[in-house]
Every structure is written in structure tokens, then in C-alpha cells.
Amino acid sequence: MKVLYVAAEAVPFAKSGGLGDVAGALPAALRKRMVGCRVVLPLYQEISPELKESMRFVKEMWVPLSWRSQYCGIYEAKVGDVIYYLLDNQYYFGRKGYYGHFDDGERFAFFSKAVLELLQHIDFQPDVMNCNDWQTGLVPFYLNKFYRNINETYANLQVVYTIHNIQYQGIFPPDIVENVLGVEWNDYAGGYLQFDNCVNYMKTGILAASWVTTVSPTYAEEIKDPFFSHGLHDLLRQESPKLSGIVNGIDTAVYNPETDPHLFKNYTLETIEDKKVNKAELQKLLGLNVREDVPIISIVSRLADHKGLDLVANVLNDILWDDVQLVVLGVGEWQYEEMLRSAARAYPGKVSANILFNIDLAQKIYAGSDMLLMPSLSEPCGLSQMIAMRYGTIPIVRETGGLKDTVHPFVAPDGDGNGFSFAAYNAHDMLYVIREAEAAFHQPEVWNKVVSNAMQTDVSWNGPAKDYIALYRKITGKR
């Protein structure tokens, strides 16, 4: 089995969100299971000079895009056991920022065409291409329209299209159809490209792919609902026979309390008492009262409505009325930033508002907190709750998307759950569950049990990698 993983970003080269983590970790997990998996992504200007120096120039090729032929340099790099191809075009990718440019439609049309042209210039012929998010939505469309009949390389190639966040669909005006995309108007008007009088790359990928996945089973069902789908629910219901959800994992070598260099003191489940050292040092670092008997509730998140900050705003004073400490790390909408700064001023020694993004501090918070609050309105998969469990910090989540699939409610005194959850998007339901967690914290035997359950939860890529391999086998007919 050979898989080419196609993404607009991948750790360690480029990352703006969860996709970068997935594209860096899943291919490595597949390689460990003897799947020949390689990754292709753009060669961005912002990739570090050290990583660029490790790349090897392979050759150049020319990519047909509408009426023109564009240069593309092929570079190769190896990270661990995974080979990466980085596609170079300075006009498209030699600028600051991965996305958000006026010509993103053209930039990723070029990338999609270049990925397919690449197969004629490398010694790797995949059985499956796994494309990700809107930036790669044209790959299966171009494959079917221009490449299927060229040779055997393309004839039996299957495409899995993975939706990481349906909110971002790659929507562009229809005037790009002929002059940019290089296809006939009938391809647009006939339905593959057109959605709501615009070109929609995600819709195109869903229709043209052999199979569609998303990043959790619950999210795969939710996006058939108008509330979650951002308009694509009818299409996803229509295509539901080829839609499934596979929950993400995390890199357990990176997120490992036993070896994490950011921690004040490393620990394992067997040495869980050392977690208290991290708690005390975190309290000192952030100017909180150093108390072992008070639970620290943390929020490591973008501060936005859809992350549930409106729920927090409604009951913040109720939460802080309890004997708890609150630690927040993140940036976002100004009203929530100001709300948290005000809370820190009003409750000195009890609230720490860190309105910034800092990886070192994030790891210290995961290790030093007792609970992590994630009351999201929607969450395709979520990584923070899995990182928290890895560090023995108990997630309190709303039952949506991947949060529902990874966090299972604990029922005292000796249940098998690994966190606390609530279903309705309601601030007082959230408050009730927070207080349920507080009560468990003050019962050492109960709390030790839920911490043990959380730390023993398999949040690695082992299970998801097996699920992807099973899917690849299913659509290719290969064992």
C-alpha cells in the first residue's frame, strides 16, 4: 500500500492549526505500520532556513494551468521515516502567510495541478491520495478530468478527501473558472464547482473524491445538519454512503509528561505526586496563591464565541465564587480578552489571564492544572482535551464533535470515564458539571481514579492509523 498525503501544511515545515499537526503525525504512524506514505505540500517562504538547508533539489517541472505553463521546483526532505515533497513557485508561495491572499484560488489550483504532475517525475506511484481541506479540493476533480486516461499511474488512483473544518470551504468568484482553473464553463454550471453562485473547492473535493472522511465520527454526523454544515448539509446527506469519521490522535512522543522539557518536573502515572510540583511552580510563576487544596481550572484556547467563551462570560462570577483558581492562555475576540483581564484584576491571586500564545507556558499549564475547560459550540476533533488527559489534567467539555468521541463522563466513585461533560449549550449546565468536577477533586480516591483513567486513555495515532489503513484497503481492494 502506498499513500501520498496532500496538505497545505505539515509539521515541522508549516503549521497554522490542527491540520499541520495531523499531516505531520499521521504519515509517520502509517509508516510504522509498513504503509509507504509520503507527504506533499507547498514550499513556503516562511519555512525556516534550517529546514530549507536539509532539502534536496530533485528537478523542475512545468505545470499547465489554464492558458499558461508555470514553473515548479521539486524539493525532497526526510523527517524520521517520512519523505516530504515540497513544491516551489516563488510567485505563489514566496510571500508572507500561508493563506489569506487575494489570489488563493489560483495559488491552490496551481498546487493541486502540481501534485498530479509530480507523479510523473518521482519514483513513487501511490494507490491512494489523501487530500485535506479546501486547499486540495481540486485534486480529485483535476484527476478525473485531465489525468485518468494518461497512464496506469492515474488510472486506478483513489482519492480520500478529509474535512478538518467545514467552516473554511475555499469560496471564490465564478470568473476564475476559465482563466484560472482552466476548465470549461460547463464544469462550473454542471454542478461540480458551483455552489451558491460561487466556486466552492470543498464541495468539488467532496463530489469528486472516492471517499470523504472527517476528523471524528460525531462530527461526520453533525455536518449533515444545517447548524454545523455552513451550507453543505444537503450535499453531505447525498454523499453520506461515502462519508465516515476517524478521530485524530496526538503525537504521544511530543506530548509526554515523562520527557516533556517544558515541565518543571517530569512525571508518569506511577509518579503522579510530582504533578503537584508542577502545580505549585505554575502558581508561583503566574502569581497565584500557592495552594495544593484548590483546583486549578485552565482554558487553553482561542477566545471566541464558538469556543464557548460566551458561556464562560455568563457564569464567570459564579465560577470564581467557588474556591478555585482560573488560568487562561490564548488570544481572540477583544471582549473576552478584556473580560479576562478584568477578572484577573478583580481576583488577584485567583485568576491569571495570559492573553498571548506561548508553547512553553501551554505545556506548563497542561501539566500544572487540575482541569481543562472546553465548552465549545462546535469542535471537529479537538487536540487540547487529549493533551490534557495525557498530562493527568481532567477535561470538562461540551458533547460535540471529537470532544464527545474522546471524553467519556466519569461517574463516581469508581467509573471508567476520563472526564466530565454536558450536552446542552447552556451556561448553567456547564457550571453544574464544573462543580461536579470540583466535588470529585475534593475526594482523593475518586479524583485519583479519574486521573488514572485519563492518563491511560489511548490518545495516540495507533487506533486512527489502523482505521485509515482499513479505509485505504477498502477503496483500493488491496490487502
Image: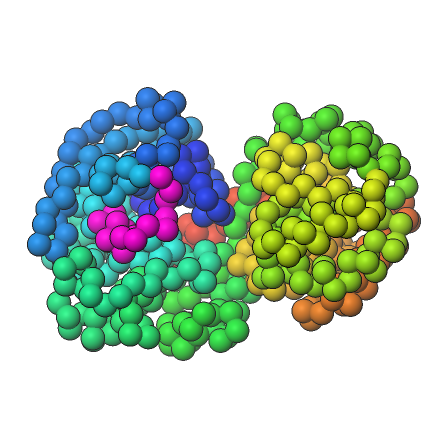
Q: How many marks?
A: 0
Against 463, residue 361 (above or below) is: above
- Residue at horizontal 18%, vertical 70%? 187
Q: Where is residue 121 in the image (x, y as percent from the top left)?
A: 16, 38
- Please indicate, yes or no, whether residue 454 appears anywhere in the rendered image: no
Against 353, residue 400 (above or below) is: below
Q: Give the range drawn in magenta.
A: 96-111
Residue 252, quarter of picture: top right
Residue 93, quarter of picture: top left
Is residue 129 left or right of 430 when viewed as pictured? left
Q: Nearer the viewer, residue 216 or 398?
A: 398
Is residue 86 left or right of 62 when viewed as pictured? right
Q: Nearer the viewer, residue 261 or 103?
A: 103
What colouring style does the render use?
rainbow
- Please indicate, yes or no, whether residue 168 appears anywhere in the rendered image: yes
Against 365, residue 379 (above or below) is: below
Q: Where is residue 28 in the image (x, y as percent from the top left)?
A: 44, 37
Q: Which quadrant does the N terminus fall into? A: top left
- Residue at horizontal 38%, vertical 22%? 50
Q: Position of residue 171 (x, y in %)?
A: 33, 63
- Residue at horizontal 71%, vertical 50%? 340
Q: Is residue 384 magenta?
A: no
Is residue 52 left or right of 463 when viewed as pictured? left
- Residue at horizontal 80%, vertical 30%? 284
Q: Nearer the viewer, residue 361 or 350?
A: 350
Q: Where is residue 281 in the image (x, y as percent from the top left)?
A: 78, 29
